Image (cartoon, grey):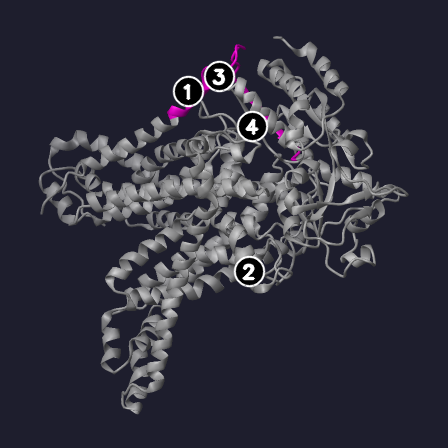
Amino acid sequence: MTRRTAGRGWLLGLALAAALVAAGCGGTDDNTGGGGGTTQLSGNIVIDGSSTVAPVTEAIAEEFRKTQSGVQVTVGTSGTGGGFTKFCNGETDISDASRAIKDEEKAACTGKNIKYQEFRIGLDGLAVVTSAQNQFLDTLTFKQLAEIFKQGGAKTWNQVDPKFPNEKIAIFAPDTESGTYDFFNEEVLGDPKEGGFKPRSDYTASSDDNTLVQGIEGEANSWGYFGYAYFQNNKEGLKDIKVAKEGTTGIQPTTETITSGEYPLSRPLFIYVKDDALKRAEVQQFVKFYLEQTPQLIADVGYVAAPQEDYTQGLSKLQPFLTTS
Amino acid sequence: MSSLSTEVFAPSMLRRGATRTAGTIAADLVFSALLFVGTLVGVIALATLIWSIFDAGWARLAADPIAFLTGFVSRFPARAGIKVPLVGSAYLMVLTALFSFPIGVGAAIYLEEFAPRNRVTNFVEANIANLAGVPSVVYGLLGLGIFARFLRMGPSLLAGALTLAVMSLPVIIVAARESIRAVPESIRLGAYALGATKWQTVRRQVLPAALPGTLTGTILALSRAIGETAPLLVIGLPIVIFSLPNDLRDPVSALPLLIFDWTSRAQAAYAEAAAAASIVLLALLLAMNAVAIFLRSRYTIRW
Amino acid sequence: MVATPPELSVTRRKARTGERLIVNALFTCAVLSIAVTVGIIAVLLFDAVEFFRESSFFDFLTGTVWAPGQGAGVGGRYGVLPLLNGTLLIGLGSLVVGLPLGVLTAIYLSEYASNRIRGVLKPTLEILAGIPTVVVGFFALQFITPSLLRPIFGEERVFIFNAAAGSIAVGLMILPIIASISEDAMRAVPSSLREAAFGLGSTKRQVSVRVVVPAALSGIAASVILGLSRAVGETMAVTIAAGNSPKMTLNFFESIQTLTASIAQTVRGEAAAGTVRYNSLFALGMALFLITLGMNLLSARIVRRFRQVYS
């Protein structure tokens, strides 16, 4: 019985592990010496919140990395509500929000002694959409939108408008954590305590706007809503529906109508930054970068820049926190 | 239950005089065809899957493979790269191996060589068998509850590696046990006869002999761990992250997570990117499996 | 168990104490596996109990609406039945795909195939088993639904996310499990049984179907239950392709949500510790763990109880 030295098995295994570690280590040289003549910062910035605002934050983080590769930025999409819960729990540095912070959330933050700054960073038009395959939808009034999304609302399209076919409405909309959801309900359904409606719960809900886009694209009788950027970036498969407030004609969401406020479902986008986080140089620079670069970048992402005063005001709000220039 | 065959066969065969009727032959043909088709469906499905992934992703990958492999994620899908998740997966794999291999092999050695045949041992063995069948997402919950939250590791490289290690443990134990079991008694007895202690025998004779099989099993377990998304998703590892981890406590991303995210994005360009990333992942798995099979065929000692 | 060395003379007493330490270390490794199980149960139980403190257990078991509420725990409905419905649909659907194909493949491999073909087929099955579930999910969404289901069953009937695509994907994933374990069971049937049947004039088909399969039945049944357990635990393919709409339905062309997909969805959407929504994760995890544990135990029991004893 011959016996091969299985000792070589050890070597092979070790070599494999070493190769992998080497491959991994080969990547970390990216963190030393980034670009530009500015001081190289390092640190972690944890950002979470609205999936509507996330594309802007991601774009900023992407550009920021080019000059400050030592700073690790992570962007999560727990939803505006979920983001605030984490923010007021001290888990995140910056919270993306597609609506202003609510009173309960403010209370939660004060309760944990978390002070923060609010910055307006852009404008979004909440786009109401259907599939590009859809033939019959063009304009919907606020009343009709409420009819679709309220609890116990329409199940088939002809219940919304007798001229529409008798087809089941396939609803895709954000879930309860979403600021977009909150905004839509406030604007369209109103306050349930004051004659408004409660939203329905029997629809395809997702915190992931991309899932909504996929769903709406795939169904001819679909209906849904999300941030304008998601419509802009997926124009081929989607059709935007003009929205009409009582007594007016339907307005289509475009950069102009959103900026002017003519589009009835325009809303501001925010980031909230912890005061504690602003004590760190990398966070200061990041927020500064955010406020300076967003007007240029935001069109890429698909949203609309806020009026310039918003950014200037933001920068002056930031000024006292800056330890470096 | 061998009476089954006589009951079923003898009377009917004798009745018909054991001839092959036309009906029988027809049934045979149909059945063979059925078997053929049934087996082929699986193979065709696999082929279709691989073809469709390549069809969707090859152009994207081949257009600029270096940029794809070394680039960062981007808001422009055409520019997006997989560097961070790819390196993240590599880191995770190495750490997972580091955690799970020693413990797995240690447990296997104990169970095979030292454990007395009693109820405790049986219980441990049954427990390991059950752990092998627990869904990966439950391991993710374990990682979330204990590593990420209770031990305050957060969604970090360490938490991810520990979770994957725990998940791979049962598989490695089983593989190691089988290799150890395959070593014949004569080897051990010979060592004892020469005056070796139990541990000396294990360390110098049994283990080296069982090592190739153990390594093969470990690499296969790791290749499975690398393809897993659910546990990492549940722990909360980030997907949009622009830098590599410097430290065990830094957040890290992984290739399957990225594929999942890109699959969920509706733009057609992301679907291509997801397919391209899938090709990379499949290639990685193929490489690992090839190494494992190579180890198995080249170094396994035939007793 | 393996032989132990005979107790010999004094010379090895020193080695003995060091050896004891080593054996204890190895014992610790083995016992760590118990720690893992304890850890899983503890984590699931602890937060699940928190969940049931705020949300009715009765509603959980009998409620037909799963609609997690706002992060502040306002107005969520946590009935698990729609999720069980979804999981059941996927489980059964995947068996419809995986069981016949798996058993047929096993019969072919065990009874009909030449060694060369086996040498090609078995690795192919291993490859199929090794494809990561995200990739299979991607395939299901990008190919199975648009290019297979919709052309056959009609664009109108098949929702973009549907249980059928998920079932096919998961079915493909459990096919190798069923095939491989069933094949092992069939190969374990002693040739004497086959030869007796051949001797009586049976054809290969008759031998396969009437002798081998019944004799291997316990193994096949075990493989089916294991496959089902795997299907129940499958997360990514169903999250991507089968949808995220918890509902009670028997229509395979609708989008549904499984237990696992709900966990994945909740984790992506929000996981702020301490909220009802976060704790619901662990209630679901508990349900999942118990279901798969039950199935795995059942499978082992079947193998033990009904295994043919060949003299």
- Give the residue displayed 57% in from the left and 51% down from the top: C259
Q: Are marks 1 and 4 in contact (CB under 8 Å)?
A: no
Q: Range of the magenta residues?
A: A25-51
Residue B238 in view, yes or no: no
Label 1 is placed on what type of residue? Answer: Asp
- Give the residue displayed 65% in from the left and 35% down from the top: A51
| Helix, strand or loop under label 4 | strand
Chain on which label 2 sits: C
Residue at which label 2 appears: C149
Q: Nearer the viewer, mark 1 or mark 4?
A: 1
Q: CA separation, marks 1 and 4? A: 20 Å
Residue A26 part of the magenta-drawn span: yes
Q: Are marks 2 and 4 in contact (CB under 8 Å)?
A: no
| Helix, strand or loop under label 3 | loop
* Residue nearest the viewer, comparing A280 with B106: A280
Q: CA separation, marks 3 and 2? A: 50 Å
* Residue nearest the viewer, comparing C171 with B34: B34
Asked which quadrant contains residue A120, the reply is top right
Using residue B238 as the reference point, say whether residue B280 is left or right of it: left
Residue at which label 1 appears: A29
Residue at which label 3 appears: A34
Label 4 is placed on what type of residue? Answer: Thr
